[in-house]
Image (cartoon, rainbow, N blue to C red):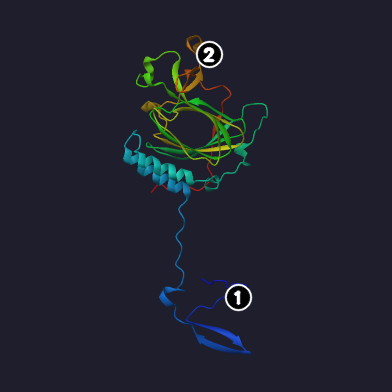
Amino acid sequence: MRVEAIGGLPELEGSRSESWVGGAIRRRRQRRPRHGAGAAPQAMATPVAAVQRLFEACREVFNDAGPGAVPPPAGIERVKAVLDSITAEDVGLTPNMSYFRRVDPHGTPKITYLHLYKCEAFSIGIFCLPSRGVIPLHNHPGMTVFSKLLFGTMHVKSYDWAAAQQDIPDAQLQGPRLAKVKSDGILTAPHETSVLYPEDGGNMHCFTAQNACAVLDVLGPPYDDGSGRHCQYYNVSSSAISVGGSMLMPGGDSYEWLEESEPPQDFYLVGSTYMGPRILDQ
């Protein structure tokens, strides 16, 4: 390979170099580099794409944990650390892309999902929310979920079932259920990755975009109706007001009554092709 020297002149290859002095060519033998200094540069390895590092971490962590199991703390921290290092640039997204434009300024904007990877153990994808876009309150049954806000500002409200109801099968419960408010506030990127668990961390949550937002999600394991991991939507129950409504318990914990519902009629979630760096499953 020819390397351009300063001034655009090509350097000569070999053990000798030539220079003009007083109009005549003077030849001189180059000194041998000492202690390896000046040795020919070695070919640089191609950097591993950020999404590839995420995939490899997820594959090892979730496969080692076993089917449907919550990874150990060290595994959680490993995946979280990789997600914390990922930027919107790493996945080829910017807020001015078409995914984040409001077509109808008066209607509810559609949400776009970009699929990166899915297997039985975990899935990776990105939710693209235009300003005022809403992902309604929904659950993640038996799942560990990592969410990284790549850019934007969004309101997040999340819940866990009240401790007395966590061990009761859904089939045995009818009507509103009491849930503890885990979080209710604004997140702005850059922000550390959030993690929710089957029974803690805000397993049920809803997102409301204040401006263009992108959320990189890892679900382990992914939704699967056949395995009992159905995505269920909820509303804050108006009928439960007569039995307590929202309650503030001693210690500052807040509780609300939630009831199952169908997805809102104005909720539109569409899939689109992910155009960023590819994941190689080798």
Tell me where residue 25 appears, x and y as whole percent.
58, 88
Residue 45 percent coordinates (x, y): 44, 60
Q: Which mark is residue 115?
A: none
Q: Is residue 181 left or right of residue 96?
A: left
Residue 269 drawn at (x, y percent): 54, 30
Is disc 1 surrounded by few (<14), some (14 to 19) or many (20+) residues within 10 Å? few
Find disc 2 in the rendering and name its residue.
238
Task: Say few, some or many: other residues with alpha carbon within 10 Å of mark 2 (under 14 / 14 to 19 / 20 or more).
Answer: few
Query: In this view of the protein, which residue sits in the foreground, 153 or 145?
Result: 153
Do residues under tags 2 and 1 come within 8 Å of each other at their CB atoms?
Answer: no
Q: Is residue 173 left or right of residue 125?
A: left
Q: Is residue 37 left or right of residue 93?
A: left
Alpha carbon separation for disc pair 2 and 1: 78 Å
Residue ranking furthest to the right: 105
Residue that badge 1 annotates = 9
Q: Earlier in the sequence, mark 2 or mark 1?
A: 1
Q: What secondary structure is found at the residue carrying circle 1? A: loop
- Where disc 2 sits, the SS reads loop
Q: Residue at x 58, y 38 (%)?
A: 152
**Residue 111 falls in which quadrant of the image?**
top right
Q: Quadrant of residue 275?
A: top right
Residue positioned 57% across, 44% down in the render: 93
- Residue extending farthest to the front is 251
Residue 174 pos. (x, y %): 42, 13
The answer, for residue 172, to whether it is visible in the render is: yes
Asked whether the viewer can see residue 259, the reply is no
In the image, residue 245 sits, relative to residue 57, either above or below, namely above
Q: How many numbered dots are placed on residues in this image? A: 2
Q: Nearer the viewer, mark 2 or mark 1?
A: 2
On screen, 256 above or below 81? Answer: above
The amino acid marked with disc number 1 is Leu
Nearer-the-camera pick, 96 or 116: 96
